[in-house]
Amino acid sequence: MAAGFLLAFGLASAVAVQILLTGHLDLPDWAVQYLPGMKAGFLIAAASMLLAHRWLGYSAGDLGLAARPRNGFPYGSLGAAAVAYLGMWIGFEVMRLFPSPGYVPTGRSSAGEQLPANLHGALVEETLLLALPMAVMTRLRWSWQAQLAVLVALRVPFHLYYGYGALALGLIWMGGYVLVYRRTRLVWPFMLAHFAYNSAHADYLPPGVRPLLGLTLCVGGVVASIRLIRQVGPGSGVSR
């Protein structure tokens, strides 16, 4: 898992730290060209899941690929995706309250570049930074506090180009993830939420669709969260 993280996110983390500390990006040409595509991450994620299955004995259910919700989740897996999206959205909005390094990339990537980058975020990040760590920590019976600390530590480094507000982002974002994942044991709702959030800011969707997509998932997340609170509240008969 550590090797997969370094291969998939090591360079991105180094770039983020450089921007945080200096406010600008000064990398060799080969590194700059590598960053937008991050194509190797897809292979690394697939290989990591295969090795976890073959060498460590994790089943598809252990890895969040075939599990069913333990106690059920309001509106099923789509409700879980909406709550995960809501946590991600709140995290980014809180992060924007903090000062940023002020780094502005030159130009804007094309829609053709944004799509694979957003797929990378959804598939690779949630495989290497959620499914695999949670499989290990669940087997070791770690507490939710320990799980949250690990997920934040894995997710924050390559988001530090946003500034120190990335710490608040990671805490809120991963807090929502831990809440949802511990009840569902499924990884695809998080992949869907991550891809939807990035797509709501991408050029490959029509301008009118982007805010509608975000609003729909935020409202769905609020409704599902309210039902979840009632479901696990006092007198509900459901164990937490």
Image (cartoon, helix red, strand yellow):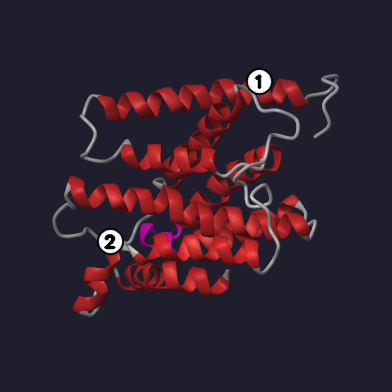
Give 42 or 111, whichever is nearer the viewer. 42
Within the magenta stretch, is there residue 97? Answer: no
Q: Position of residue 105 (x, y in %)?
A: 20, 59
Q: Main secondary structure of the magenta part?
A: helix
Q: Is residue 8 above or below residue 226?
A: below
Q: Quadrant of residue 13?
A: bottom left
Reading the image, the residue beneath label 2 is: 37
Task: Tell me if residue 159 is in the magenta stretch.
Answer: yes
Q: Residues within 10 Å of mark 2 (few under 14, many from 20)?
A: some
Q: Which residues are magenta?
A: 156-165
Q: Residue furthest bottom?
A: 28
Q: Is residue 69 visible?
A: yes
- Residue 195 location, x and y as percent? 39, 42
Q: Is residue 24 above or below residue 162?
A: below
Amino acid marked by disc 2:
Gly
The mark lying in front, picked from 1 and 2, is 2
Q: Which residue is mark 1?
A: 227
- Left or right, 212 with reference to 144: left
- Quadrant in which residue 30 is drawn: bottom left
Picture coordinates of residue 194, whole percent (x, y): 44, 43
Left or right position of 168 against 237: left
Image quadrant containing the C terminus: top right
